Amino acid sequence: MIFSKISITIGSKSKRSKDAIGNIILSLAAKAVSIISSLLIVPLTISYVNPTQYGIWLTLSSIVGWISFFDLGLGNGFRNKFTEAVADNNFILAKQYVSTTYFSLICIVTLLWLIMLFGNHFLSWPQILKVESIYTEELRIVFAIVGTFFCINMVVQVFSTLLTADQKVGFASIINGAGSLISLAVIYILTKYTTGSLTSLALYYSGIPCLVTLIISIIAFSFSSYKRYAPNIKEVRLTLIKDILGLGIRFFLISVSLLLIFQMINIILSRELGPVAVTQYNITNKYFNILHMIMTIIIVPFWSLFTDARVKNDYAWMRNIVKKLEICWIIELIVGLILLAVSQIFFKIWIGDKVEVSFLLSISMLLYTLNQSIGSVYMNLLNGIGCIKLQMIIYLCSAIISWPLLVASCRLFGLPGIVIMPAFVYLMQALFGKIQLHKYLSHNANGIWGK
C-alpha cells in the first residue's frame, strides 16, 4: 500500500521520476530491515548492559560521531560535482573526483585519528559525562574503538555517496540495511553467550557496518560497472580539491552548526538529568524517527536528480516535484498522529518496564520530527541546486546560541523541553527554504536567495 501511494503521489512519465520511484521503493524495503533491526536492538542492548550504561554508550557514541562532521564538506561537495560530471558524460572527470575525494579524506581522517587517540589519554570521561569514576578505563577503550571505526567509516562511506550521486540510492540503502541486520544478529549472540560489556558493544556495533561497506565497495570497484570509477592514485588531481571544497566548505560549516545544535543534546541531558534521561530521549527519538527515516528515503534521491535537472534546465519538472513532496509531508503528519496515539502501548510492548517514557515527551518529539522532515525537504532540494548560503547562515546563527538555550529549556521544561530549540531551527529552515526554492524556480532568486 505504501509503495502504491508513493508511486501515485510522485508518479510521472519522466525518466527522473521513474528512477526516483525505483530508488524509493528499493530504499523502503532496505530501510524496513534497518528500522526493524534498530527497534529490536534497543531492548537487546539495554538487557545486555543496563539503562545507565546504555545512556553512557549513546552519549559517547554521539561525541565520537562528531568526527564525521570534520570532512570539510568533501562528501557532499563530491556528490554534486560527480553528478554534474556524469550529467555532462565526462566520465574521466568523474573518476578523478572519486580518486581525489578518497585521497583527501584519507589524509584528513588519518590526522583526526592521531589527534583523537592522543587526546583520549588526557580526557576524564567520567567528569565530562558526570558518571562514576569506575568507568574511566573502559570509557577510554570504548572511545578509541568507536573513534577508529568512525574514522574508517568516513572513508568507506564515499562509495555510498557515489551510489547516491549516481542515482542509486536504493543500493546504498541495501548496504546500510545489511550492516544493521548483521549487527542485530551479533548483539543477539552476545546477549546469549557473554556478559554485558561496553567494550564488546562498541567493537561489534561500530565495526560490523563499517566492515560490510568496505567489503562491498571493494567488490563493486573490482567487478561491477563501477570499475571505471575505481579510485586510483594516478587519477588524483589536487586542483580538483579546491573545486570540491568550493561548495563543500559551506556544507562543512552547516555540518559543524548541526553538530553544535543537535549533537550536544545527549551531553546536556547526561549532565543535567543523568544517563537514564539520555536513554528515554533516544528511545522516543528512535520511535518517531521512523517517520523522518521514511521521509528521508523519499527525499534523498531528489538531491542528485535536482542537480541533474539544474544542469539540463528542467525547471518544470523541479516545480512539480516540490508540490508532490509537500503532499508526502502531509501524509507523514497524519501517520505521525496515529503513532502518537498508540505510542504508550508500543513503548510498553517494546521496552516493557525497563524505561519509562512520558506522553508529553512523545508529543514534543513528534513536533520536532515533523519540523525536521519539512525542513529537510527544502534543504535537500536546495542542496541539489547548490543554493546553500542562506541555510548556512541560519544554522550558524542558531549554533552560536544553541548551548545556553538547550540548557535553559532543559532546566525549565525538563526532558520534553530539550527539543524546543532544535524544532524551532528546523521550522525556520522550512520557512526560509520554501521561500528561497520558490524564488529560484521562478527565476527570481536575486542576491542571497540565489547563492
Image: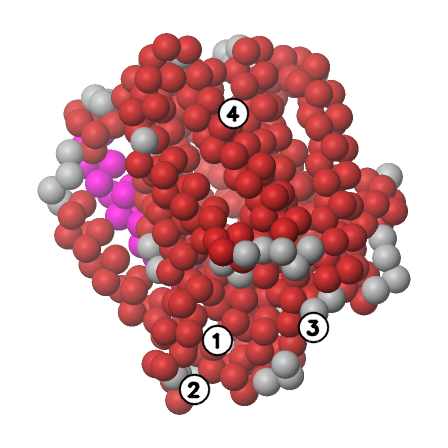
- Amino acid carrying label 4: it is Ile
Mark positioned earlier in the residue sequence (3 or 1): 1
Q: Which mark is residue 235?
A: 2
Which SS class for mark 1? helix
- The residue wearing badge 3 is 312
Label 3 to label 1: alpha-carbon separation: 23 Å
* Foreground pick, 285 / 331: 331
The amino acid sitting under disc 3 is: Lys
**Element at label 4:** helix
Mark 1 or 4, closer to the camera: 1
Position of 81 compared to 235: left or right?
right
Q: Crowdedness of circle 1 by 10 Å Cα count: few (<14), some, many (20+)? A: many
The amino acid sitting under disc 2 is: Glu
The nearer-to-camera label among 4 and 3 is 3
Q: Which residue is mark 1?
A: 98
Residue at the spot of label 4: 283
Magenta residues (range): 135-155
